[in-house]
Image (cartoon, rainbow, N blue to C red):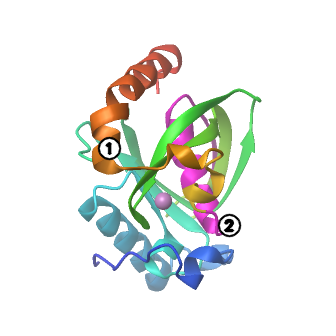
C-alpha cells in the first residue's frame, strides 16, 4: 500500500482511454495493490474519488469515498467507499444540474460542469462481484467525474462557459455559500 504521485493535466496517461482490467485478474496481488494504492492516495489527498490513470495506472478502475468532513468539499453528502473495476454508466433521465468541480489532477482550478442527476452505475467490486446500482442527486456527479477520467476526459473539457473557471480561494470567497445552498436543496430532494 502506498500513496502515489498524482499526475497533472497535460500528462498523456490522463488524456488516453484507459484499458479494461481482465476480470479474472481482479483478485491478483497486482490489481489488489492498485486498489489499495488508489484508496490510500485518495484519502491522503482528501479527494472525493480517484481514477487509476490519475496515478499512472492506465486501467479502468476508480474509487469514490466522501466522509462527513471532507475539507476540499465540506458541503458534499457522504458516499461510502466504493471500488469499481471496468465501470459502465447510463443516464436514467435527462435532468441535469450545474456542478462546481475540482480535480486532484487540475490543481488550483474549479469550474462549472453540467452533470446528470440520475445515473445507473455497474462494474466489478474488489472481490470481482459484478454490481449494479443507481446514484441520484448530487453524488451522481462524483461518479460521472471519475468515469470521465477513464475516457481521458477532465472536468475542464466539460466546462461550457470558460468564464466560470476560478481558483479555489475565489470559489470559497464568492461562490461556495450559494453553491452549498443549492447542494443542500439537492440533498433534501434526493437524499444524496
Ligand atoms: Ni478528477
CA neighbours of label 2 inside 10 A, class few (<14), some (14 to 19), many (20+): some
Where residue 106 sits: x, y (%)?
44, 64
Residue 93 percent coordinates (x, y): 76, 29
Give the labeled residue for mark 2.
Answer: 151
Q: Is residue 89 visible?
A: yes
The numbered mark, 1 or 2, whose residue comes first in the sequence reads 2
Separation (CA) of disc 1 from disc 2: 29 Å
Residue 124 seen:
no
- Image coordinates of residue 163 in percent, x first then y, are 54, 45
- Which residue occupies 35% across, 55% down? 47
Marks 2 and 1: in contact by CB < 8 Å? Answer: no
Instruction: Report the front residue among 158 and 33.
Output: 158
Ligand 1 within 8 A of label 1's CB? no
Does residue 95 sit above or below 120 in this rendering? Answer: above
> What residue is pinned by disc 1?
170
Q: Is residue 108 magenta?
A: no
- Rendered view: 57 above or below 187: below
Residue at 27% from the left image edge and 36% from the top image edge: 173
Foreground residue among 179 and 49 = 179
Q: Is residue 155 left or right of residue 116?
A: left
Front position among marks 1 and 2:
1
**How many neighbours does mark 1 have within 10 angstroms: few (below 14), some (14-19), or many (20 or more)?**
few
Secondary element at image label 1: helix
- Residues rendered magenta in the picture: 131-153
Question: Quarter holding the N terminus?
Answer: bottom left
Amino acid at each position: 500500500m502506498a500513496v502515489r504521485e498524482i499526475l497533472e493535466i497535460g500528462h498523456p496517461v490522463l488524456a488516453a482511454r484507459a484499458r479494461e482490467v481482465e476480470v479474472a485478474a481482479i483478485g491478483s496481488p497486482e490489481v489488489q495493490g492498485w486498489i489499495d494504492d488508489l484508496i490510500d492516495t485518495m484519502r491522503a489527498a482528501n479527494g472525493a474519488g480517484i481514477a487509476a490513470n490519475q496515478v499512472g495506472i492506465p486501467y479502468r478502475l476508480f474509487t469514490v469515498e466522501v466522509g462527513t468532513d471532507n475539507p476540499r468539499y465540506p458541503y458534499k453528502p457522504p458516499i461510502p467507499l466504493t471500488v469499481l473495476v471496468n465501470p459502465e454508466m447510463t443516464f436514467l433521465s435527462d435532468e441535469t444540474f450545474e456542478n462546481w468541480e475540482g480535480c486532484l489532477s487540475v490543481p488550483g482550478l474549479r469550474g462549472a460542469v453540467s452533470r446528470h442527476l440520475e445515473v445507473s452505475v455497474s462494474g466489478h467490486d474488489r472481490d470481482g462481484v459484478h454490481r449494479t446500482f443507481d446514484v441520484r442527486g448530487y453524488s451522481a456527479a462524483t461518479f460521472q467525474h471519475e468515469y470521465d477520467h477513464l475516457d481521458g476526459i477532465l472536468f475542464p473539457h466539460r466546462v461550457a462557459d470558460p468564464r466560470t473557471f476560478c481558483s479555489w480561494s475565489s470559489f470559497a470567497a464568492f461562490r461556495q455559500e450559494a453553491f452549498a445552498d443549492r447542494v443542500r436543496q439537492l440533498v433534501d430532494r434526493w437524499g444524496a
